[in-house]
């Protein structure tokens, strides 16, 4: 699984500038459509261009790419429910190919009859369901450059005396499990503490995509219930809801992950 910074509803302003590709946001909800980077172009030699695109795609194995072809015209589409940095980097490198091929950007009103299509399916890991019910997968509101973030959230409670030791153990688990971001909210009351824990990663560039095994991570967190009087979920009423924070333990790309006034 890939955690971290992605785009779905809005374009990553001030990070990327495209000459050919246009961003189409996802809508979510009942529409349930992927976000897309799309262009319609005309090239001098379709077969030559596609051959070069084939070689380029070998360096971006996690991306879905689809081509519609009409003689020397192509509609190129990159789409997914989370567009990470490596999706936009792929589009930039396709644009470099298009420039070298003297490609011409076509208006969407230009007549186009699909004569053939070609899809490049992404290399995906074997699907694994999340084995641990205390794990929630959550998105975020918009951060810098319209970034969203895909994170693990765990709600739990334990005695205040054990809180710092638990946090230290969670930091060690993060380091073992390739998780670079860990922060939390809390609320202390009497001798008890409610915690809202967040685990994620930063921006996912093609040179350094970070994958995690969510069930391995979850198993190590569950083992902490044998070491501490730790219970999943929150104790008390809404008055004890953990909104104090965020308290940052591990962080990269902070401006794309945290807002000063809102962490969820």
Image (tube, helix red, strand yellow):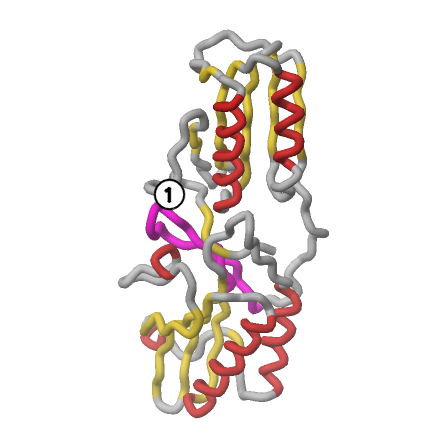
From this view, report whether residue 33 is shown above or below residue 182. Answer: above
Q: Is residue 121 left or right of residue 156?
A: right
Q: Is residue 62 left or right of residue 235?
A: right
Q: Which residue carries the number 1 mark?
A: 15
Dividing the picture into quadrants, the one containing residue 20 is top left
Q: Is 150 inside the magenta-drawn segment?
A: yes
From this view, report whether residue 110 is shown above or below residue 169. Answer: above
Quadrant of the rendering where the C terminus is positioned: bottom left
User: Which sits in the foreground, 41 or 221?
Assistant: 41
Q: Tag 1's secondary structure?
A: loop
Dot 1: within a 10 Å radius of its alpha carbon, few (fewer than 14), some, or many (20 or more) residues? few
Q: Residue furthest left?
A: 261
Where does the magenta region start and end?
Answer: 134-152
**What residue is rendered at 36% in x and 74% in y?**
247
Dividing the picture into quadrants, the one containing residue 57 is top right
Q: Measuring from the top left, give residue 35's x and y in whole percent.
A: 48, 36
Query: Count the marks: how many?
Result: 1
Q: Measuring from the top left, give residue 168's x and y in whole percent.
A: 49, 82
**What residue is rendered at 35% in x and 50% in y?**
142
Q: Residue furthest front?
A: 100
**What residue is rendered at 53% in x and 57% in y?**
3
Quadrant of the rendering where the N terminus is positioned: bottom right
From this view, report whether residue 61 is shown above or below residue 204. Answer: above
User: Which sits in the foreground, 68 or 205?
Assistant: 205
Q: Is 83 inside the magenta-drawn segment?
A: no
User: Which sits in the foreground, 27 or 86?
Assistant: 86
Q: Measuring from the top left, give residue 151's x and y in whole percent.
A: 49, 60
From this view, report whether residue 48 is shown above or below residue 262. Answer: above
**What residue is rendered at 49% in x and 17% in y?**
102
Q: Residue furthest top?
A: 111
């Amino acid at each position: 699984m890939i955690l971290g910074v992605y785009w779905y509803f809005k374009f990553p302003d001030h990070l990327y500038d495209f000459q050919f590709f246009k961003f189409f946001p996802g809508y979510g909800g009942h529409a349930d459509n992927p976000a897309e980077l799309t262009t319609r172009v005309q090239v001098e030699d379709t077969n030559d261009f596609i051959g070069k695109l084939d070689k380029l795609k070998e360096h971006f194995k996690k991306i879905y790419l689809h081509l519609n072809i009409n003689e020397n015209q192509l509609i190129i589409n990159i789409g997914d429910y989370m567009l990470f940095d490596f999706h936009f980097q792929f589009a930039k490198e396709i644009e470099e190919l298009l420039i070298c091929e003297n490609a011409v950007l076509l208006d969407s009103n230009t007549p186009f009859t699909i004569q053939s299509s070609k899809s490049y399916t992404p290399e995906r890991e074997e699907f694994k369901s999340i084995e641990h019910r205390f794990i929630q997968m959550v998105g975020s509101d918009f951060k810098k450059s319209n970034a969203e973030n895909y994170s693990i959230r765990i709600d739990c409670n334990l005695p205040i005396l054990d809180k710092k030791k638990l946090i230290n153990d969670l930091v060690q688990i993060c380091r073992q499990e390739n998780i670079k971001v860990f922060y939390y909210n809390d609320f202390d009351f009497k001798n008890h503490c409610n915690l809202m824990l967040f685990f994620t990663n930063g921006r996912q560039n093609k040179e350094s995509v970070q994958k995690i095994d969510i069930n391995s991570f979850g198993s190590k967190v569950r083992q902490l219930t044998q070491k501490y009087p730790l219970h999943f979920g929150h104790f008390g009423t809404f008055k004890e809801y953990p909104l104090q924070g965020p308290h940052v333990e591990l962080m990269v790309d902070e401006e794309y992950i945290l807002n000063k006034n809102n962490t969820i």
